[in-house]
Image (cartoon, rainbow, N blue to C red):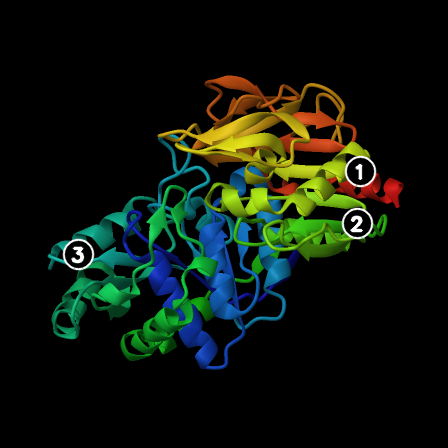
Amino acid sequence: MSEMKMPRIMISAPNSGSGKTTIVCGILKALMNQGKRVAAFKSGPDYIDPMFHSKVIGAKSRNLDIFMLGKDTVRYLAAKNAQTVDISVFEGAMGFYDGMGKTSECSAYDLAVTCDVPVILVVNARGAALSIAATINGFKNFRPDSHVVGAILNNVNPMTYMFYKNVIEEETGVKLVGYFPIMQDCNFESRHLGLVTAEEIGDLQQIVDRLATQAAKSIDFEAVLELANNAAPLQYDDVAITEIAHPRIAVAQDKAFCFYYQDALDLFTELGATIVPFSPTNDAHLPECEGLFLGGGYPELYAKELEANTTMLADIKAHITAKKPCYAECGGFMYLLERYKDESNTYNWVGAIEGESALTKKLTRFGYIHLTAQKDNLLCKAGEGINAHEFHYSDSTNNGTSFAAAKASGKGAWECAVTSDTLYAGYPHLHLWGNVEFAKNFVKKCAQVK
């Protein structure tokens, strides 16, 4: 067992829509403006909020998902990514206690307990007064180990904040560390998978600068840093990863394909691989590589551009036809099918897998799942498994049968993924730190090509 001093806080909230992400972005930027070295972490599987963190702090943000990774790995990755920073800021997901099903399992609260993180609650205080104290008190005392030690009031003016600050602190024993006023011009847009990506907000930096300026005025950073520095040393078990081979893995990274867990990409590098980023939308050809990784994202928004890039489509199909390893999930899987259809058009895509995909009018799959291989494939042997998640509005005519998927609750099961000894393609999103052997098998197979 190792331990390290790791100043850290979590920004969470009673529910989604309380303003967590905007306030976290403002705090991250303000801390950087003070010369602090900052790491950001996101509770759960969400890809989009970490993109905002990354754009703000200039370093990759990391996901800490207890279901997909397990508590030991979560603690290790938290420590690993905080080695050279002054403060780590965790962002909670959904409401603080909202976990799997009717439980708090895998919630922001569960992560706070797992990593022993002091929690600052963001409370939407618009239209409330002393009731704010009741809300904070309820969240603090709902569990004896809640870790709730501070609060930020959102959507209030400075006079209201100062008027109620003392009584709220007296009633709750929780320190108010600041407030944010209503800032209509600093809201982030949403779409069917959540917020729009950071790449799509042209004035993101200006928005973040305004948030940071406001944070500098209305957040008590001395109090925030004190709470962070009071966190107990983080205890964790070291994980030894050694280089096993040195293939080049081309990773699709552009507006259409942008859903990746940075720790998983880093794992490939630690195993000896070289990551070669490319754009299926804009680059004429696939870069020289032994392996190919097509992540999720929003390919449906760029269907016409993807279809028009015929040389890229041909290169990717040739790569797969030549039995070179390819790992594709969700949007990447859709891209490998023959066609994508929207309400009025049909677009021809790679065609390495038979079938077509289209958006539906509701979430087709959503939530945590466990995958068990039905046969030997690129990533694992039959009978081996990994925890994963699905979140997509599209569906396809050929979802595959190589893995058996089961909901985390144990209710509901289905088949998914098209595989061979050189291919994994399916809707589920994996985090390869959830089963490091999957990553090792992919890198080894890529090295065989080299």
Q: The residue tagged with tag 1: helix, strand or loop?
A: loop
Crowding near pointer 1: few (<14 within 10 Å), some, many (20+)? Answer: many
Compared across the picture, whether 223 is left or right of 81 comes to left
Which numbered mark, 3 or 1, is in the foreground of this view? 1
Q: What's the amino acid at mark 2? A: Cys
Compared across the picture, whether 109 is left or right of 440 comes to left
Q: CA distance from mark 3 to mark 1?
A: 58 Å
Res 78 quadrant in image:
bottom right
Q: The residue tagged with tag 2: helix, strand or loop?
A: loop
Classify 221 as above or below 393: below
Q: Which mark is residue 289?
A: 2
Q: Are marks 2 and 1 in contact (CB under 8 Å)?
A: yes
Q: The residue tagged with tag 3: helix, strand or loop?
A: helix
What residue does disc 3 label? Answer: 132
State which tag comes first along the sequence, 2 or 1.
Answer: 2
Spot occupied by residue 236 in the image (x, y as percentages of width and height):
62, 53
Kindly identify the residue that appears in the image at 17 percent across and 74 percent down: 158
Q: CA distance from mark 2 to mark 1?
A: 9 Å
Residue 185 visible (yes or no): yes
What residue does disc 1 label? Answer: 324
Which numbered mark, 2 or 3, is in the foreground of this view? 2
State which tag comes first along the sequence, 2 or 3.
Answer: 3
Classify 397 as above or below 442: above
